[in-house]
Image (cartoon, rainbow, N blue to C red):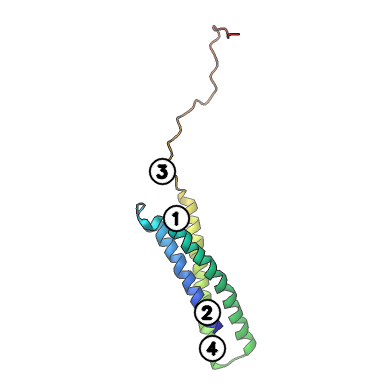
Amino acid sequence: MNHIVALFSSVASLTLIGLIYVCRFRTRQSSWLQSEYIGMNLMALLVGLYTLAVPATLLGLWRLIADGLSLSTLMNSAIDLASIAAIIATTALFLRAVRRANREGTTPNNVFPLTPSPSAPRTPPKGMKKAA
C-alpha cells in the first residue's frame, strides 16, 4: 500500500509542476491561465503532495531493503524506482522553472517609467546672490 501511495503522490507532483510550468511559461500573456490564483492553488497542492511523496518513497525503499529478496519485493522495487524517477523529474522541472523565472525578470506593466534625472546636482550660477 505504501508503494502505491508513493507512486501516486510522486506522479501527481510531477503533473502539478508540469501544469505550473505550462501555465506560467507556455501560455499567452492575456490568458486566464496566467492568473496568480491558479498558480497559487497548484503550488499549494504541489507542496502537500511532494512532502508526501519523498518520505513515502524512502520508507518504501527501506522496507524493500529490510524484507529481503522475493517476487513481491521485485515488483515493489519497480514501483519505487518509478516513484524516484518522478521525484527527480519534479525537482529538475521545478529548478528549471525557477531559473527561467529569474532569468526573464518580468517587469510590471502598470507602472509609469521614471523621468530621467541629471547625473550631477545643479549648481546656481555664480553671478546670482541667494535671497536671505
Q: Give the mark toward the camera: 1 or 3.
A: 1
Q: Give the mark toward the camera: 4 or 2.
A: 2
The quadrant of the picture occupied by the C terminus is: top right
According to the picture, the residue beneath numbered tag 1 turns out to be 36
Above or below, comparing residue 72 to residue 12 in the picture: below
Please state the horizontal and vertical placement of residue 76, each as a whole percent of the image.
53, 86
What separation in Å lies between label 1 and label 2 (alpha carbons)? 29 Å
Q: Give the mark toward the camera: 4 or 1.
A: 1
What separation in Å lies between label 4 and label 2 (alpha carbons)? 17 Å
Quarter location, residue 124: top right
Q: Secondary structure at mark 2?
A: helix
In the rendered structure, which amino acid carries the disc numbered 1? Answer: Glu
Q: In terms of sequence position, does the residue under pointer 3 or pointer 2 come before the other?
A: 2
Quarter location, residue 55: bottom right
Q: In terms of sequence position, does the residue under pointer 4 or pointer 2 come before the other?
A: 2
What separation in Å lies between label 3 and label 2 (alpha carbons)? 43 Å
What separation in Å lies between label 1 and label 3 (alpha carbons)? 15 Å
Q: In terms of sequence position, does the residue under pointer 3 or pointer 4 come before the other?
A: 4
Q: Are marks 4 and 2 in contact (CB under 8 Å)?
A: no
Relative placement, left or right, of 128 versus 109 is right
Q: Residue at x 45, y 50 (%)?
A: 104
Q: Which mark is residue 77?
A: none
Q: Secondary structure at mark 1?
A: helix
According to the picture, the residue beneath numbered tag 2 turns out to be 5
According to the picture, the residue beneath numbered tag 4 turns out to be 74
In the rendered structure, which amino acid carries the disc numbered 2? Answer: Val
According to the picture, the residue beneath numbered tag 3 turns out to be 109
Please state the horizontal and vertical placement of residue 5, each as a whole percent of the image.
52, 79
